[in-house]
Amino acid sequence: MDWLLVGVVLTAFVILGSSRLDSCIRMVALQGVLLSILPPMVRGSLLDWHGLFLAAASLAIKTVAIPVLLARSLKQAKIKREVEPTVSLHYSLLAGGAIVVIAFSGFKLLPVPTGPFPTLLIPAALTVVFIGFFLLISRFKAITQVIGFLVLENGVFLFGMTLIRDFPLTVEMGVLLDLWVGVFVMGIMIHHIHRTFDHIDTKAMASLKDAE
Amino acid sequence: MNPIFLLLTPVALGLITLFIRGDRKRSLRRQILFWGALFHLSGTLSLFLPNSKHAINPFLTLDALGLLFLTLTSVLFFLVSIYSFGYFFKEYRSEQERGMRHLYAPCMLFFLASTTLAALTSHLGLLWVAIEATTLATAPLIYYHHHARALEAAWKYLLICSVGIALALLGIFFIAAAGKGKGLDLFVFDFVANAKSLDVRWLKIGFLLVLVGFGTKMGLAPLHNWLPDAHSESPSSVSALLSGALLNIAFLGILRCYQICAAAGLAHFADTFLILLGVLSLVTAFIFITNQKDYKRMLAYSSVEHMGILSLGLGVGASFATLLHMINHSLAKVLLFLTAGQIVLGYRTKKVAEVHGLLKTLPATGILFVMGGLAVLGLPPFAPFISEFLILRDALVKGHTLAAVLYLVCLGMIFVAMSKILLGMAQGEKHEIPGALERYPWLMFSPMVLAAALLIFGLYLPPPLVRFLNEAARLLGGGS
């Protein structure tokens, strides 16, 4: 199962280092595929209906619905398809490397609770969560912020789906539904941000503050 | 009544109103909203009857804490739905820009449904789903006015809260990991019953993540950045619900995890962080209330202050007073936002400097606004005075002297800063105002009920309420 975890971390790195928005979106979709394979694998058997159902739903939302929605709002907004980060891509990748080191050395302080876990799981999940955070604070375009949020959420999922095998299906569906509706609302807002400000740079949205 | 209807009815009505579009049908949508709220309120009150059914299945089981949040939300929602008749009638004609206006009633109803779910459930995963759903339901409400500033506020709100709540989910997974291998499902009561066998280190990290995550949504400093923007840019009825219901629901999320920590003997650990965030919020609120130029932002920072008081109150072990204060703050803040909405309609501005002579220009509004202001500042004879005093007493009795001193100093400073603004608005000569208030009775009914409740609870706390609050406080490891 280690290859899956490595794959998820690698896709996060590609997002961190890529300068084009459409390749970021494709990577989010790929990350979704990797995450969707997880539930049946964790359950050990491919014929377990709970795992299969979860995989199907996650595949539908994370790899089809959300990326399609993002790609569409990218097209509608007719923006330059570059990421335009505040921290240059080289430094972003360096920061990513630092995050991996911290996540791998830091988790040793915590003993994994009883149960068979791949040793890579917790550091990998933490890495993805931190990279998501880094994306959120170092990118200003509304759409890249959504991508950062998705990476962060994927990190959380990675952690949860492997650790919690007995999460009831309804709750898992609820989590996925919330994610989908959230990105849907964000997509509509990106459209409006573009219409109102003529671009989707969140730097323009700084009129609300306390000092005049 | 079976509590499941409290959940299903708002969802169903929300879906129906979603398909009733068009400006001409707005009064129909408002009426559906009102009847939905009335149904919800009567259903909730019927839960207090003896022999009423509180548990549907393990996922939906109402305890005293949940019932408290449910009742508070339901009452406030009902009052706001009455206010909506007057407020939007006026606003519709006074502004030019057009928005997704038809989304107001459905989003309000979805908000009601998700808060109901959050109050009903004792499953941590489902609780998370419900709290995230409240964020999603309210984001379009904040964007109601459809101008650039509202868009900025809604975007900030949606993104910051979603990220915060994702962290809370990570925290919940950590808490689940703490009980790993014990065959525990994610039910709060399961965790509380088996608290001694939990892995303490994982539980600690889990609680911190939950505190940061839900604390973001609750508006605790330094994670409060979204709050003033969202409160000042949304329509006043929405600001009122954000302050009076949404922040509380995030607090419920923290309380549920606190229950587990307290049972596991980690109360002391959790208290330290709660007090820290509480004091930080009080200081932040003071800094930004001083010389605040926008009165709705001032009210928003006052919410930061009171969320800080709740956090600090829980931290010093004053569970009963904290829950009482939550009720009082919600009543007072909803009153203030609803009257602030009338001021916005009358004066057509949110700037403090442009509002004078409120008591002479709009006497009834002015009196209620000042009453709400005095209540929220903690003056007797209004109810918040009692709860703030009780928190101070418990802090001193339980030996948190430093926290108590900081609490008192901050309250004092905020009192000076905010009363200066409030009195400046209230006093002065009569003013010709650009807007006229039509349908004034619709606008006045709810604030008057709230003001009366604040006064009554300030003078006399009914014994059934005290008993009920004690029962809820016992779940938090406090109460008497």
Image (cartoon, coloured by chain):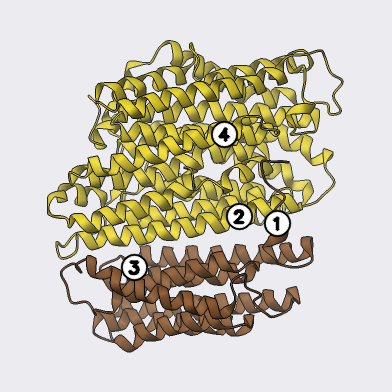
Task: Tell me the distance, in whole angstroms, between the alpha carbons under discs 1 and 3.
Answer: 39 Å
Rate crowding at label 2 as few (under 14), some (14 to 19) or many (20 or more) other CA atoms within 10 Å. many
C-beta proximity under 8 Å, tags 2 and 1: yes
Task: Tell me the distance, in whole angstroms, between the alpha carbons under discs 2 and 1.
Answer: 9 Å
Pointers 2 and 3 within a single chain: no
Task: Tell me the distance, in whole angstroms, between the alpha carbons under discs 3 and 4.
Answer: 46 Å
Q: Residue at x 61, y 64 (%)?
A: A186
Q: Which residue is mark 4?
A: B287
Image chain in yellow: B
Q: Choose the circle earlier in sequence order: 2 or 4.
A: 2
Q: Nearer the viewer, mark 1 or mark 3?
A: 1
| Label 1: chain letter | A
Q: Name which residue type carries label 1.
A: Met
Report the disc number at residue B333: none
- In which quarter of the view is residue B414 placed? top right
Q: Position of residue B366 (x, y in %)?
A: 69, 18
Q: Which residue is mark 2?
A: B156
Q: Name which residue type carries label 3.
A: Leu
Rate crowding at label 3 as few (under 14), some (14 to 19) or many (20 or more) other CA atoms within 10 Å. few
Q: Residue at x 23, y 40 (%)?
A: B268
Q: Nearer the viewer, mark 2 or mark 4?
A: 4
| Label 3: chain letter | A
Q: Which residue is mark 3?
A: A169
